Amino acid sequence: MYEADLAAVYDAFYEARGKDYAAEAADIAREIRQRAPQASSLLDVACGTASHLRRFAALFDDVEGMDLSEDMLAYARAKLPGVRLSRGDMRTVDLGREFDAITSMFSSVGYLRSTDELDETTHSLARHLTPGGVLVIEPWWFPETFLSGYVAGDVVTSGGRTIARVSHSVREGDATHMQVHFIVADAESGAEHFTMSHVITLFTRQEYEQAFERAGLTVEYLPGGPSGRGLFIGVR
């Protein structure tokens, strides 16, 4: 039951664990406006359940979201009625308009499988920027900063449900292979266990920077960021 409602489980888990989407969105907006003070439109790529986008909507006059998962989009539409949310692939997106800012958070770019796909994506997104527009990408770990064998575990309670998440990540070649286990339980349905597997590419800092530059963007890397993995910020 819960596996079929993964978007709701995902959303509830990170909110209850204390991820501060409002503070992260405010920090990103500040970085954008340092480079484009008049920025008023924003596209959030791989927007997922729209937890960042909902906060961006309070900071920008005109926002849109895009994601590859229809399940995530269906959940996001219930949270953000009236906001345009499109299904699309970041490598080939064509929304027929430009934005002052484009964001891609939560290391979604790591699901690209090669530097060719990374180039394809940065070109695709750069085409959607207004002159002087800003692209912000939160990367996955670099090869030298990823800890192979890393185990993470958290238990939270949200809306009468207890959600436990345990993950184990190892390096295989140039990618992280992550196995994630969820146990979700409530008084009525009992407990359900399901697993997810992720393959996330360990691009180098240079590979990110070269992709931005090949797309015609100036680029800088800011250490830290929302999850400790930093941010790449490009300007058209």
Image: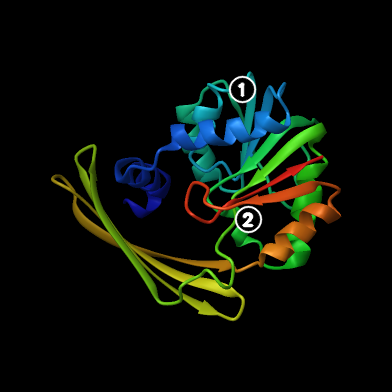
- Can you tell which mark lies on residue 109? 2
Residue 124 x %, y %: 79, 47
Q: Position of residue 101 (x, y in %)?
A: 70, 33
- Number of callouts in the render? 2
Residue 141 to residue 71: above or below: below
In the displayed structure, does residue 156 sit left or right of residue 31? left
Mark 2 or mark 1: name the one nearer the start of the chain. Answer: 1
Q: Residue 174: x, y in percent? A: 62, 76
The vertical placement of 92 against 57, above or below, is: below
**Residue name at image x 50 percent, y 44 percent:** 71
Q: Which mark is residue 60?
A: 1
User: In x, y percent, where is residue 36?
Assistant: 73, 29
Is 43 or 38 nearer to us in this picture? 38
The answer to whether residue 156 shows anywhere in this view is yes
Q: Amino acid at mark 1?
A: Phe
In the image, 104: left or right of 98? left
Quick one: SS at disc 2? helix
